Image (cartoon, helix red, strand yellow):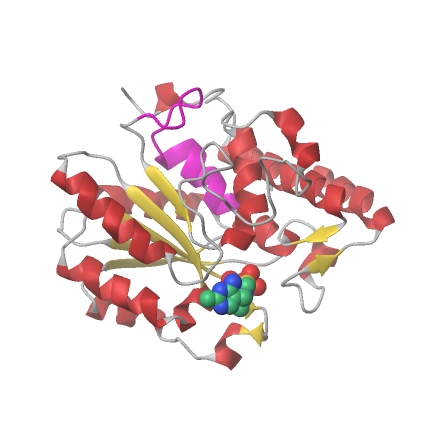
């Protein structure tokens, strides 16, 4: 089955998908009045490319054995993934208003057992890449041609387990593993490089035998091209796409807000944010 057949409405542009993912995230954020909104806006272009250009999946059968796996290591980015899963038709749109509520399938931190399409329970930082390595090894043993993607953050570069997994993937030549790092420059305690300076980042992964690309994570064409190159690269090596993103992307007054790891947005600002997003639609 071709990838195009697996997803609905494939005549919608990737830019429009990203806009709709951002919109879903803002609507969920509004339900709680606060949250990891800036990350969601920043990573929406990458998620649009993931769910509408790269991944193979069946919306009506999220556990289809032939699917590519998308692991969300950063459980606090769940709002962003729910926004994409709604757009992809894996989650129903009307569930959006339950975000973060009691008995909701959309808890504020990603839980695999709760949510269709959520492959792993993330949240304890630094574990996603190791889990993805295990999945990729298992799929290879089964002779599957599925890819395993793992989205992790620049904050997770501070975790030793990330580097253990990176070395292991390179050693096992896991060419079915595609890492995506969201380098948004921030983490809970402030600027990421002020906590631990991970630059230069690309040579570190290269030294661990990964095929490395670095792109502007808000340039949708560049992200799509990098994902294509990652999938089709001939070397038997794991692949990583380092994505430099801008927190709050698409809503300038949120882009410029300081300490944006966990945003509190005033009640009247949600409609303003949605209006600004609608005006810049598809840009
Ligand atoms: C092992 C572990 N240590 C600490 C935390 C607390 N924590 C939650 S999010 C976060 C920041 C992580 O950095 P990043 O994902 O880059 O932050 P963001 O870009 O979302 O601001 C921290 C330290 C955690 N979830 N897990
Ligand atoms: Mg970060």
State the image coordinates of residue 197 (x, y, percent, origin top left): 43, 79
User: Where does the N terminus fall, quadrant-wise?
Assistant: top left
**Left or right relative to 9: residue 57:** left
Between 25 and 273, the residue placed more toward the observer is 25
Question: Which quadrant of the structure image shows residue 272?
Answer: top right
Residue 243 lies within the magenta run? no
Q: Is residue 69 above or below residue 130?
A: above
Seen at 51% across and 37% down, the residue is 114
Q: Point out the residue furthest to the right here.
A: 268
**Left or right relative to 189: residue 52:** left
State the image coordinates of residue 212 (x, y, percent, origin top left): 28, 59
Between 213 and 153, the residue placed more toward the observer is 153
Q: Which residues are magenta?
A: 44-64
Residue 62 lies within the magenta run? yes
Q: Is residue 177 above or below residue 60?
A: below
Q: Is residue 14 visible?
A: yes
Total numbered badges shown on the rendered structure:
0
Question: Which quadrant of the structure image shows residue 261?
Answer: bottom right
Q: Point out the residue furthest to the front here.
A: 103
Between 67 and 108, the residue placed more toward the observer is 108
State the image coordinates of residue 198 (x, y, percent, origin top left): 39, 75
Q: Is residue 274 above or below residue 199?
A: above
**Left or right relative to 2: residue 23:** right
Seen at 66% across and 63% down, the residue is 260
State the image coordinates of residue 33 (x, y, percent, origin top left): 77, 49
Seen at 33% across and 67% down, the residue is 161
Q: Is residue 185 visible?
A: no
């Amino acid at each position: 089955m071709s990838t195009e057949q697996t997803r609905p409405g494939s005549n919608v542009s990737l830019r429009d998908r990203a806009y709709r993912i951002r919109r879903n995230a803002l609507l969920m954020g509004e339900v709680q009045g606060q949250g990891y909104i800036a990350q969601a806006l920043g990573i929406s272009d990458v998620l649009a490319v993931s769910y509408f250009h790269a991944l193979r999946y069946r919306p009506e059968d999220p556990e289809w054995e032939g699917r590519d796996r998308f692991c969300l290591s950063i459980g606090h980015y769940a709002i962003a993934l729910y926004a994409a899963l709604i757009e992809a038709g894996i989650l129903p749109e009307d569930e959006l208003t339950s975000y973060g509520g009691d008995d909701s399938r959309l808890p504020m931190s990603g839980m695999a057992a709760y949510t269709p399409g959520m492959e792993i329970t993330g949240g304890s930082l630094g574990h996603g890449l190791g889990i993805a390595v295990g999945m990729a090894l298992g799929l290879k043993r089964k002779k599957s041609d599925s890819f395993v993607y793992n989205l992790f953050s620049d904050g997770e570069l501070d975790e030793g387990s990330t580097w253990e997994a990176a070395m292991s993937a390179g050693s096992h030549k896991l060419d079915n593993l595609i890492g995506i790092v969201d380098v948004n420059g921030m983490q809970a305690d402030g600027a990421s490089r002020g906590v631990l300076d991970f630059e230069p980042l690309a040579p570190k992964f290269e030294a661990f035998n990964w095929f490395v690309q670095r792109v502007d994570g808000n340039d949708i064409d560049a992200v799509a091209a990098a994902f294509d190159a990652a999938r089709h690269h001939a070397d038997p090596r794991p692949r990583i796409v380092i994505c430099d993103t801008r927190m709050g992307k698409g809503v300038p007054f949120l882009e410029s807000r300081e300490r944006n790891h966990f945003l509190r947005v005033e009640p009247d600002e949600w409609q303003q944010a949605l209006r600004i997003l609608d005006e810049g639609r598809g840009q």
